Image (tube, rainbow, N blue to C red):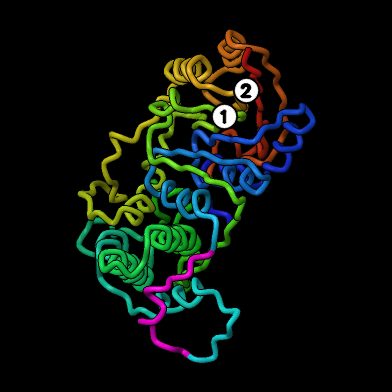
Amino acid sequence: MIMRYIGNKESILDKIFSILEANKIRGTSFFDFFAGTTNVSRFFKSKGYQVFSSDILYLSYCLQKAYVENNEDPAFPSLLPLLPDKGGCSLFTRPLDLVVDYLNSLPPVKGFIYQNYTPGGTKNLDRPRTYFIDDNGGRIDAIRMKIEEWKVAGLINESEYFILLACLIETIGFYSNIAGVYAAFQKHWDPRALKPLELKTIEFVNNGLENKVYCADSMDLIRNIDVDLLYLDPPYNERQYAPNYHILETIAKYDSPSVRGVTGMRDYSDQKSRFCRAKTALEDLDKVARTAKFRYLILSYNSEGIMPQDMIIETLQKYGKVKLEQFEYARFKSNNNGLSKTKKTVFEQLFILEKR
């Protein structure tokens, strides 16, 4: 599954990797500074790197725990004996498939997601929220509540817990009535949002190494970073990521937050990135380059980003040799407005710093 996410690099990772290979940028350890959906971490994990990753969003941490830190399919030894025997399962059926099948059989529950993000749950608002149809909102609640119940009862371990949360987080985007992000819902129903939600399984990469993940502001970790490749893929405009994925964050935490406004936004004041302002972005880029321990720093940055190309080069050149590579690719779909209605592509810039 490819989760829709601002700045998702899934489609251009092979190109990025080929550029690094052509420049003989190699090593054994890799730090993904803004992990997001973990696509970059997973890619370099599949290439045999020991991967470290971090993101301030808890939804990303759930994905990191499942995809990056974890190296194997979950077995669910404590849970499986308690699930109904459906019959017809072969010895080759994955335990994860059996657990997901059970979760898909649960009846909807009118929990927090139903009450705040479906038309039925918000019918008393001036403008009811239409992120999910009623049935799917209730199904999300039922699945999320059951996962939490199993965790509290000790029927699933930490790894199994985060794997199931990752399955849910990855699934939701395919049934959400949004144009790409959760900062707003659509007036009219997208056909995919009308389909009955069916929880999907995820796949894993085993690199046989001890990979480490964090839920933190990566800037707080830089003094502890010591890797061959330090990869930065920061926000490139003034839009904060947290409000764009507030519903996924709430589903991941399931903490029943106070929400406000037309979209039911949770508070995100402690999750703002300084990379969303040009001045503070350059200050933090300088701090990373100066403080972190690495052989190579790779900054992947959109050509329309708020940090000017010349200022990036000037900042990085203070700490070593800098090379710029760039290539054209299709822009993120939800950004296709204004200028982008006529301009369908942008350039991805790779700033490669070899630290002296």
Image location (x, y in percent) of residue 276: 44, 27
Q: Nearer the viewer, residue 81 or 333?
A: 81
Q: Quadrant of the N terminus?
A: bottom right
Judged by its main secondary structure, the magenta piece is loop
Q: Amino acid at mark 2?
A: Arg
Which region of the structure is painted magenta? Answer: 73-86
Q: Residues within 10 Å of mark 2 (few under 14, many from 20)?
A: some
Image location (x, y in percent) of residue 271: 34, 35
Residue occupying the point 60% across, 24% down = 297
Residue marked by disc 2: 295
Q: Amino acid at mark 1?
A: Val
Tell me: 52 left or right of 330.
left
Image location (x, y in percent) of residue 236: 52, 29
Q: Residues within 10 Å of mark 1 (few under 14, many from 20)?
A: many
SS type, badge 2: strand
Residue occupying the point 67% across, 16% down = 322
Residue marked by disc 1: 227
Which sits earlier in the primary sequence, circle 2 or circle 1? 1
Tell me: 148 left or right of 61.
left
Is the C-beta separation of discs 2 and 1 under 8 Å?
A: yes
Against 17, residue 70 (above or below) is below
